[in-house]
Image (cartoon, rainbow, N blue to C red):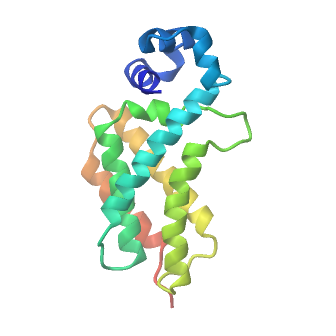
Amino acid sequence: MAAAAELFEERGVADVSVADITGAAGAAKGTFYLYFPSRHALIASVQEELAAEMTDVMADAADGIDGGCAAVVTEQVRAIIEFWRRHARRLDLLFHPAVSPGEIDPAINILVGALTRTISDGARAGEIEVDDPPRAASLLFGAVRGGIQIELQRGRPQWARLHRATEELVDRLLQPAA
């Protein structure tokens, strides 16, 4: 999987074949299919590893944060932005469709799940008022993803402005409980 991840990051997912992967790994093409039923299965596995790495970064960023749920989510979002800022070439990999239409990528579920748990914990503790934590987490993740992609497309990303905008979004989305 390491050879595949490296090629995906270097060339983009669409431009990497199974033959490219097995060639880089020094393995026979038939060996690939002993481990993965398809190229899409490999992509999903690499995406899940990347998502797990990102959730570790999110957890580290949130560790020891005082100030409640909104402060923790703000730091988790900041960690997502900074991760993608440093690893922009991995965006193609993370968001390349690895599942059939109508299904949600497991990697996206992992990341949204991390935000959902934080938001749900804050709602259960009575810190914030959120009727639907999974939808709030999905919307927040989608907004951050879109913001990052737009900043990268500009060619001269304004990361500080994106951080401020996401902090404002978190503050508005996660209102303190009355």
Tell me residue 98's x, y (percent).
Answer: 62, 32
Q: In which quarter of the image is residue 63?
A: bottom left
Q: Does 151 appear above or below 64?
A: above
Q: Quadrant of residue 71?
A: bottom left
Q: Residue at x 28, y 48 (%)?
A: 159
Q: In this view, does 113 lie to the left or right of 57?
A: right
Q: Which residue is drawn at 34% across and 65% down?
A: 62
Q: Does 11 appear above or below 50?
A: above
Q: Which residue is drawn at 42% across and 27% down?
A: 2
Tell me residue 81's x, y (percent).
Answer: 35, 49
Q: Residue at x 63, y 21 (%)?
A: 34
Could you say which is closer to the camera, residue 2 or residue 153?
2
Tell me residue 164's x, y (percent).
Answer: 31, 60
- Hey, which residue is sitting farthest bottom in the picture? 178
Q: Can residue 39 be seen in this view?
A: no
Q: In which quarter of the image is residue 166?
A: bottom left
Q: Does 29 appear above or below 90?
A: above
Q: Does 44 appear above or below 79?
A: above
Count of numbered labels shown in the rendering: 0
Q: Is residue 132 left or right of residue 51?
A: right
Q: Is residue 56 visible?
A: yes
Tell me residue 102's x, y (percent).
Answer: 74, 41
